[in-house]
Image: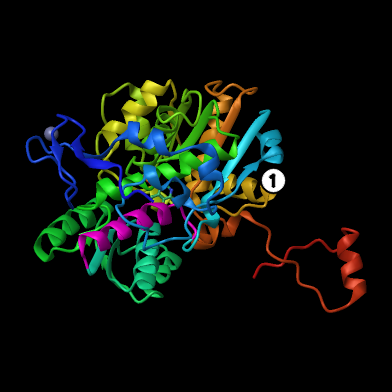
Amino acid sequence: MPTSFVRGLKCRLCGKMYPKEPLNFCTEDFGPLEVDYDYEAIAEVLSRSKIEMRPENMWRYRELLPIDGEPTVGAQVGGTPLIKADRLAEALGVEKLWVKNDAVNFPTLSFKDRVVSVALSKAREFGFSTVGCASTGNLGNSVAANAAAAGLEAYIFIPADLERSKILGSSIYGAKVVGVTGTYDEVNRLCTQVAFKYGWGFVNINLRPFYAEGSKSMGFEIAEQLGWRVPQHVVVPMAGGSLVGKIPKAFQELAKVGLIEHARCRIYGAQASGCSPISTAVKNGWETHRPVRRPNTIAKSLAIGDPADGYFACKVIRDSGGWAEDVSDQEISEAMVLLGRTEGIFAETAGGVTVAVTRKLIEQGRIPRDEEIVICITGNGLKTQDAVAEYVEAPVIIKPSLEELAALVDGAAREPVLV
Ligand SMILES: *Cc1c(COP(=O)(O)O)cnc(C)c1O
Ligand SMILES: [Zn+2]
C-alpha cells in the first residue's frame, strides 16, 4: 500500500500551500484550508476493480482520503445501503428515487462516523492523546464512541438544551460531556479558544480540513452503488454546510481519476425554517449567508446559525444548477413518519428535513418528476423520538384474549389508548 497522496493543505481563498498540520485557516486571509491531493498519482494506482475487491466500508476509497498510514480509528465505518425507494417515490410522485441510508452507519448511527474516523485517525498520526468537538449531538456521539475504542480522551461540548438521547449517546462512552448554556455558535467559539489553550485535537476546528474529507465517502459510495455513475439530483441536509460540498467534490474526484465518466449532478440543500441561513441565502440570491442568532427548530442537529462553510455551500449549490429550501417543524415530523411508513426507515429530524424539502422541490417543479434523485438520510430516529411522538398512533391495549383482538381487527373496538 502506498502511503499518502496528500501534498499538503491549500487555502480555498488565496491558494497558499501549508504542510500537513492541525490547522484549519490560512494565516494570510483566514480562508479555510483544504486537503490537496496528487490526483495524477491516484489515477495511476486506483481502479474500479481494485476498489471492488476491498471490504465494504469507507476505507475502500482510502487513496482519496487524507491519512498517511492505515486507518486506526473507525475501520468499519461506511458501506451503508443505497435503497431504491419505490414506495416513497410513489408518495412523492416521482419515478426514480434512492435513499442513501446513513441512519445505520456504524458505530453511532449517523454520517458523522465518516468524518470522525478520518479526523481521529489523523489525530493519532499527529500524536494527540486528547480530542474534542463542538457538536449539535451526532458529532459528539461519534467522537465519544470512536475515541473510546481508540483509547483517546474525549471532551464533547454541546448546547445544554440538546435532546436527552444525544447527550446520553455521548456520556455512555465515558467522554467528558460539557453542556454550554448558549447556541452552537457560542459553543464553537469557546471550543476554538479551548483548542488553542490546551492544544487538543478538535475534530471540527484544528482538524477540520481532514475531518471534512470524510464526508466524501458518502458521495463515493452513492456513485459506486449506482454502478459507477452519478444521479441527476442529490438532496443533502445542511448544518455547517460541509457535507453538501463534499458530495459533489467526491463525484468530481471520481471523474478526475477516471472512475466515472462525468460528475454532472444538481445539488440541493435542505434546512429547517427555524434555522435556515444557507437556504435563505440561496433563495435570495445572496453570495453568502447571514447568521441566524437564535435557531429555533426540532432539527437540532442542523441548528447552526453561522455555518462555517456557508459561503461555499451557497456557491456549490448555485454552480451545480441546484437549489435550496427549508421546511417547518410540522413538515419535518410528518416527513419522518412518511419515510417510516413507506420505506421502513426511521430517520432523525434531519432526515425529516431532507424528505420534506425533497417533496417541496418536486412540488415546485425544481426537481423534475422523471429524473433520478438520491436523498441523503444522515441520522437515526431513535435519537430524536420526541419529534414524532405526537404524530404516530399509540398502541391499542387489549386483554390477552382472542375476542378482544378480533374486535380490534374487525375495526369495532378501534379506540386508540393513550399511554
Ligand atoms: C452534522 C449533520 C449534518 C450536516 O452536516 P454539515 O456537514 O455540517 O452540513 C446532517 N445531518 C446530520 C444528522 C448531522 O448530524
Ligand atoms: Zn489564504
Is residue 273 left or right of 177 when viewed as pictured?
Answer: right
Question: Which image quarter holds the C terminus?
Answer: bottom right
Report the front residue among 333 and 174. Answer: 174
Residue 3 image position (x, y, % from top left) = 32, 50
Is residue 283 left or right of 229 when viewed as pictured?
Answer: left
Q: Which residue lies under the disc numbered 1?
A: 342
How packed mark 1 is, by other alpha carbons closer than 10 Å (few <14, some 14-19, many 20 or more), is some
Name above or below for residue 242 compared with residue 123: above
In the image, the segment drawn in magenta is 109-128
Report the front residue among 62 and 361. Answer: 62
Q: Looking at the image, which residue is at 51% across and 44% down? A: 51
Q: Please state which amino acid type lies under the numbered disc 1.
A: Thr
Q: In which quarter of the image is residue 316?
A: top left
Residue 180 visible somewhere in the drawing: no
Residue 44 image position (x, y, % from top left) = 40, 34
Mark 1, secondary structure of its residue: helix
Q: Main secondary structure of the magenta part?
A: helix
